[in-house]
Image: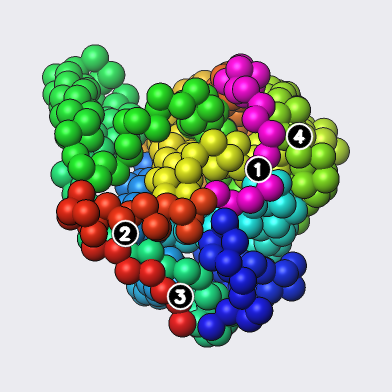
Amino acid sequence: MTQATAPSRATGVEMTHRQILEALSGLLLGMFVAILSSTVVSNALPRIITELRGGQSAYTWVVTSTLLATTATTPIWGKLADLTSKKILVQLSLAIFVLGSVLAGLSQSTEQLIACRVLQGVGAGGLTALAQVIMATMIAPRERGRYSGYLGAVMALGTIGGPLIGGVIVDTSWLGWRWCFYVGVPFAIAALVVLQKTLHLPVVRRQVKIDWWGATLITAAVSLLLIWVTLAGDRYDWLSWQTAVMVTGAVVLGVLAVRVENRASEPMIPPRLFRNRTITLAVVASIAVGVGMFGASVFLGQYFQISRGESPTMSGLMTMPMILGLLVSSVVVGRIITRTGRWKRYLVAGSALLTAGFALMGTIRYDTPYWHLAIYMALIGLGLGMTMQNLVLAVQNTVSTHELGAASSVVAFFRSLGGAVGVSVLGAVLGHRVKDYIADGLTALGIPATGSGSGGVLPNVHTLPGPIRVVVESAYGHGAGDIFLAAAPFGLIALIAVIFIKEIPLRRHTGDAVTDTVVQESAVAAGGGAAVVRTGTDR
């Protein structure tokens, strides 16, 4: 039972600041586990792919597979959150994530690793959607900025600690890269225990209807496009019969998905939400932020290790300006929003900083002075801290209580979708650009260019002869600059979208859950619906 409960318009319980922090403690620990388990791999990935004899395509798909699974399952978790116990769901998602992590550590090939990362993505989809939904259930929009700052701090801590821990693990011979996947297990067990003891939420249960057809069609359409982008130009030409079949198939699947969603009684992505201007613009901005956030930054570890010859540990240290920028902006801006109730200006400023940071990172090469890189990465971090959580906040402030799960998961869905597309597309761009730059560099040295390309094994620059090493470092450095430059227009799209979002004053209550429940119960009593409604509290 919750402590000192009193009915309110919010959740049926009135919670003090201390009680909210206690309730959020397990959730924040779970988020830390998910983020740590994801980022701990980032700087280890070049070493992992090299040891498993994978190439640039495998590197891309190890990341893309997780994002795609997260994308596909986020709406399902969000819908379930509107229909059943959020506490059980978040515990289940955490358990799935841990299972995927352990299996990933046992992988013997890149194919096995990619499959296990899919399972991790399913769990991450739950944690991503449910964290926002649970916060929205307990905390009024006006106060949510303060607690979103805590969430941002935890994200930043996991993002800072992950690469550093991963680098140390990979650089420690008696541990090895497999421990990158095992390291989060103790934290996950602790999170499950804390969640059981501290998270107590009112439960409104209805008959669960999941739009499996819609979820399947959406996932299939996106997957087909990503497979096409990854393989085109390497396994077959961009203009080929394979391209025609895959693109046509993706379009047909997309059309069928829209048709199914319009007819489904409980659609994965409710089309009615897009009649809300704020949600539509926030989705556009979320896609753009996702492309930039995942699509470009995921290759930073590869840039530092291949282009600059740094160790995994040092690579983690060198990315800290971006993470510190994220930490500072998310905490400080969250508190300012809580105090003032104004949020749009920070979305605009964050999108502008994101665009500027990507554009400046587009100028990097293998020998760019580090202090330049530090400034550029700090701008990106500041921009991400101002935009990610506040896009969700803007959407949650415009919907009714019973749609919080669906609305929150829609934003997370499209951000993950943007990330999956970004990683796949920019990874393909990087592979092709690196192939061309290496070929040009080797030709200048009078060496025939063979075996270099997006599908080739990632090089270990420390084993290459001096002149060839410079060619490879230069190629990967120039290629990294190209993908950041390609990400800059997406930051601009996000900026344009948030400019047109109308600022609605943040509500000082979480909604009218009690009223909603009464209406639902009355409707059932009158025979007005097939839903089965039971209210209670998570134990």
How far is the residue under mark 3 from the one under mark 4? 33 Å
Tell me what residue is drawn at x 54 percent, y 65 percent. 12
Mark 1 lies on residue: 507
How far is the residue under mark 4 from the one under mark 1? 11 Å
Mark 2 lies on residue: 521
**Alpha-carbon neighbours of circle 4 within 10 Å: few (<14), some, or many (≥20)?**
some
Tell me what residue is drawn at x 25 percent, y 20 percent. 237
Mark 4 lies on residue: 342
Question: Which is closer to the viewer, label 2 or label 3?
Answer: 2
How far is the residue under mark 2 from the one under mark 3? 17 Å
Is residue 228 in view?
Answer: yes
What span is colored magenta in the figure?
A: 495-511
- As shown in the figure, which amino acid type bears the numbered disc 4? Arg
How far is the residue under mark 4 from the one under mark 2? 36 Å
The first of marks 4 and 2 along the sequence is 4
Q: Mark 1–mark 2 contact, CB under 8 Å? A: no
Mark 3 lies on residue: 537
Question: Is 176 situated above or below 164?
Answer: below
